[in-house]
Image: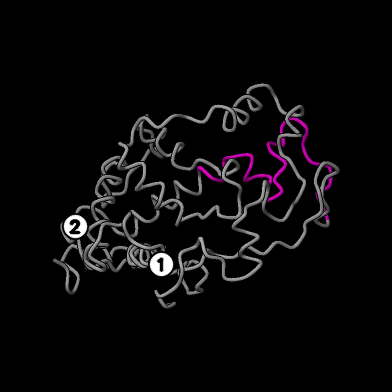
Amino acid sequence: MKSLLRNEPTVPESPKQAEQQRGREQPGYYPGFSTLSQKSFWDESTRKTVIDRVDNVPEIRFFQPNEVEFWKTVFDHLLPQDDRREERRIPILNFVDQRLGANQSAGYRFENMPQDREAYALGLRAINEEAQRLFGSEFIGLPYAQRETVLKTIHDGEPRSAKEIWQKMSVHRFWQLIMGDAIDAYYAHPWAWDEIGFGGPAYPRGYMRLERGEPEPWEVEERRYQWLAPAGSLSDEIEPTHEYFIESVQHRSHHKNSRGNDGAV
């Protein structure tokens, strides 16, 4: 693990990172590409749905003000957007808030998980308890690198506190929930499609070049793009994670947390 004695992400470590922190209108491998430039080729219903994600961002209605600050900070760690200009950052929290406010779910629930609304409430408490245990402060009050460390204990399925909370829900399932929500909200947005070169819905136009990986006439050539993790981030550490998604491992972790972790209070 990296040293925690690193600067906050507002202090660039290199010219490349300084450039990234100034932000770009469009980061990614496809500079100049705009998915919305193709909107005239979509059917009316699809066009309205996609454009609404840019022009009609849902207001925060479910989360309380203190929860808004907390979860915005968490999502900024899960999916950093420091290479985007402020006005071009995708409002992940707003779309998660909309889902929870409408009490929408995937249509099923794992037996070791509560309803999503309750999971978010419990998760906030658990993360704050972990922050207090490790660093003596609530999560929001910590420096960036220490917040990373707190979240990594959840990611690794090895929290040292909030035993009663992890008896109510699986730590791995909780991580999958919040990470999945971040990814769903981000990559449903056309600005993220610009970043990965996705041309939007294929219907009704379809695709022309299905061989040799050639771009369509409306696409642009891929260019090299180097993203640098924020200073103090642990997200550029490489480690095997496939075992986290094995059912037997998740069950073992849940039972371990149900019995209590070493040192848990």
CA–CA distance between discs 2 and 1? Answer: 28 Å
**Residue under numbered circle 1:** 145
Q: Earlier in the sequence, mark 2 or mark 1?
A: 1
Q: Residue furthest left?
A: 265
Which residue occupies 38% across, 37% down? 105
Q: Is residue 147 left or right of residue 206?
A: left
Main SS of the magenta part reads loop
Q: Position of residue 163 (x, y in %)?
A: 17, 61
Which residue occupies 71% across, 32% down? 203
Identify the amino acid type marked 1. Answer: Ala
- Where 169 falls versus 198 (above or below)? below
In which quadrant of the rendered view does residue 244 lie? bottom left
**Residue under numbered circle 2:** 167
Image quadrant where one finds the C terminus: bottom left
Q: Is residue 104 left or right of residue 112?
A: right
Q: Position of residue 33 (x, y in %)?
A: 76, 45
Query: Between tags 2 and 1, which lies in front?
Result: 1
Q: Is residue 174 left or right of residue 262?
A: right
Q: Along the line of sight, which residue is nearer the eye, 114 or 26?
A: 26
Is residue 255 visible in the rendered structure shown here?
Answer: no
**Magenta region: which residues?**
185-211
What is the secondary structure assignment of the residue under circle 1?
Answer: helix
Packing grade of label 1 (10 A; few <14, some 14-19, many >=20) is many
Q: Position of residue 188 (x, y in %)?
A: 57, 41
Which residue occupies 30% across, 36% down? 64
